[in-house]
C-alpha cells in the first residue's frame, strides 16, 4: 500500500498594507485627502469623468470608492472623519447641465460649479500623436497654479483658498524634484467669468542635446548603425529636434540637483508640459456656508439685473429640486426591492 507524504503547509502570511500618512513628515502640515463621488444617476461620459477626477486627485483619494444608490451625504461624512478626508468632489447632472461641487468637510464651505464643457482624459490622449503616461506619474500629488484670481473679490478669494488647500503644500527648499511630475492649472477669465481647468504632466529635457543621444542615454538601447559609415555620423547627423521642440529661454531652468541620467545640475534643462486631462470649463454659480447647505455667500448674477438674477435662481432651484427628486426616487426603489 502506498504511503502518502504529509506535505508541509505554507504558513499564512498576512499582507502588509501600507497606510497613507496623515501628516507631512517635512512640513508637519495635515495632508488633505478627498472623496470623489456622484449624487443621482450619471450618464456614461460623466461616470468616466468621475474616474478621471479620482486619478487626478491621486494618491490621497479613494480610487476604488464604491457607491450605492441608498448612500446619502451623511454616509460619506461619517466615514470621512476616521479616514482623515478633508474635501468632497461631488458630480451631479440635471436636465440643463452637469454640476461639480467642491466642499470642505465637515462644516463647509461648498462651491458649486456649472460644467460648461469637458473633455475626458481618453479623448485628449487620442488627439495626441505621442500620449505620455509613465508608471509613476500618479505616485505624487500634482502642483497647483492659479491665474487671474487676484481681483480682490470675496468669492474669488474663497475659490483660491479652496483649491490651494485641496492639494498638499510643498516646501520649495526641501521638495524633491523627482516628485514634481504633474501640474493642475486654473485660469480665471474676467470677461467670461469662466475657469479653465487643465491637467498637465511635467518633463525635463536637456538643452542642446539631440533626440538620438537623449534616447540612447535614457533607454540604454543599442542604436541602429547599419546605414551609417562611422559612429560619429550618429552624433553629427542626429539633429537637435523639430521646430516644436525648439528651446525657449523663458522655459529653461537650472536645476538645483541632478534629475535622472540626462538632466544635470551643471546644464540647463527645458520644461515641457503635455496635457493628460481631464479638461474642464467651469462657471462658479454659488457658494454656501455649510456642507451643501447653509446661507448663500455668493450667487452668480446676484447684482447684475433682474432677468439674469431670475435665470440663475431658476437654475439653482431646478438643480436642488432635481437632486431631491432623484434621491427620493432612489429611496423608493430601494424600499420596493427590500419588500
Image (spheres, grey):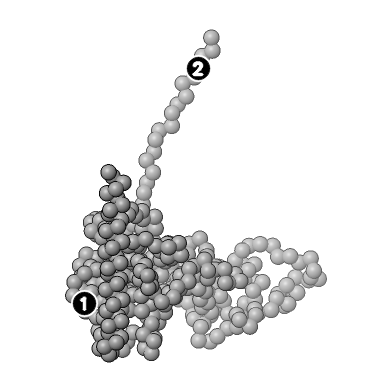
Would you say 5 lies left or right of 68 here? right
Q: Which mark is residue 81?
A: none
Write down the residue under mark 2: 4
Q: Which mark is nearer the camera, 1 or 2?
A: 1
Q: Is 34 drawn above or below residue 283 in the view shown? A: above
Write down the residue under mark 1: 296
Would you say 243 lies left or right of 256 here? right
Can see residue 106? Answer: yes
Pick out the residue farthest to the top. 1
Circle 1 SS class? strand
Q: Residue at x 27, y 68 (%)?
A: 321
Q: Which image quarter holds the C terminus?
A: top left
In this rendering, the count of numbered labels is 2
Where is residue 165, by image quadrant?
A: bottom left
**In the rendering, at what x and y percent does residue 265 appear?**
50, 76
**In the rendering, at what x and y percent does residue 320 appear?**
27, 69
Where is residue 47, by image quadrant?
A: bottom left
Would you say 63 lies left or right of 246 here? left
Viewer-side residue, 40 vs 53: 40
| C-alpha gap between disc 1 and disc 2 | 77 Å
**In the rendering, at what x and y percent does residue 307 appear?**
29, 87
Q: Is 48 drawn above or below residue 315 in the view shown? A: above
Would you say 236 lies left or right of 248 here? right
Q: Earlier in the sequence, mark 1 or mark 2?
A: 2
**In the rendering, at what x and y percent does residue 75 appear?**
25, 56
Q: Residue at x 49, y 67 (%)?
A: 121
Where is residue 56, by image quadrant?
A: bottom left
Q: Residue at x 46, y 65 (%)?
A: 45
Q: Is 61 drawn above or below residue 272 in the view shown? A: above
Q: Residue at x 31, y 61 (%)?
A: 326
Q: Is 301 drawn above or below residue 135 in the view shown? A: below
Can see residue 172? Answer: no
Amino acid at each position: 500500500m502506498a504511503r502518502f507524504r504529509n506535505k508541509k503547509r505554507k504558513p499564512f502570511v498576512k499582507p502588509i498594507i501600507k497606510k497613507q500618512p496623515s501628516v507631512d513628515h517635512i512640513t508637519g502640515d495635515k495632508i488633505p485627502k478627498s472623496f470623489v463621488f456622484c449624487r443621482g444617476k450619471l450618464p456614461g461620459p460623466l461616470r468616466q469623468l468621475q474616474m478621471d477626477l479620482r486619478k487626478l486627485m491621486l494618491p490621497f483619494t479613494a480610487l476604488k470608492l464604491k457607491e450605492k444608490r441608498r448612500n446619502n451625504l451623511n454616509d460619506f461624512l461619517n466615514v470621512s472623519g476616521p479616514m482623515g478626508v478633508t474635501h468632497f468632489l461631488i458630480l451631479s447632472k440635471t436636465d440643463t447641465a452637469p454640476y461639480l461641487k467642491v466642499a470642505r468637510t465637515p462644516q463647509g464651505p461648498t462651491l458649486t460649479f456649472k460644467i460648461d464643457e469637458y473633455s475626458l482624459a481618453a479623448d485628449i490622449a487620442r488627439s495626441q500623436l505621442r500620449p505620455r503616461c509613465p508608471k509613476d506619474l500618479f505616485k505624487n500629488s500634482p502642483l497647483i497654479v492659479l491665474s487671474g484670481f487676484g481681483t480682490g473679490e470675496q468669492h474669488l478669494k474663497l475659490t483660491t483658498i479652496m483649491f490651494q488647500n485641496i492639494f498638499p503644500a510643498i516646501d520649495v527648499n526641501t521638495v524633491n524634484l523627482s516628485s514634481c511630475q504633474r501640474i493642475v492649472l486654473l485660469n480665471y477669465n474676467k470677461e467670461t467669468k469662466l475657469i479653465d481647468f487643465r491637467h498637465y504632466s511635467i518633463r525635463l529635457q536637456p538643452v542642446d542635446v539631440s533626440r538620438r543621444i537623449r534616447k540612447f542615454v535614457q533607454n540604454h538601447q543599442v542604436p541602429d548603425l547599419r546605414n551609417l559609415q562611422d559612429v560619429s555620423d550618429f552624433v553629427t547627423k542626429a539633429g537637435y529636434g523639430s521646430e516644436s521642440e525648439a528651446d525657449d529661454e523663458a522655459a529653461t531652468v537650472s536645476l538645483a540637483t541632478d534629475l535622472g541620467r540626462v538632466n544635470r545640475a551643471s546644464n540647463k534643462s527645458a520644461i515641457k508640459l503635455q496635457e493628460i486631462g481631464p479638461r474642464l470649463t467651469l462657471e462658479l454659480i454659488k457658494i454656501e456656508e455649510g456642507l451643501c447647505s447653509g446661507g448663500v455667500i455668493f450667487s452668480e448674477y446676484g447684482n447684475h439685473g433682474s432677468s439674469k438674477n431670475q435665470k440663475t435662481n431658476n437654475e439653482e432651484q431646478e438643480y436642488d429640486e432635481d437632486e431631491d427628486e432623484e434621491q427620493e426616487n432612489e429611496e423608493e426603489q430601494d424600499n420596493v426591492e427590500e419588500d
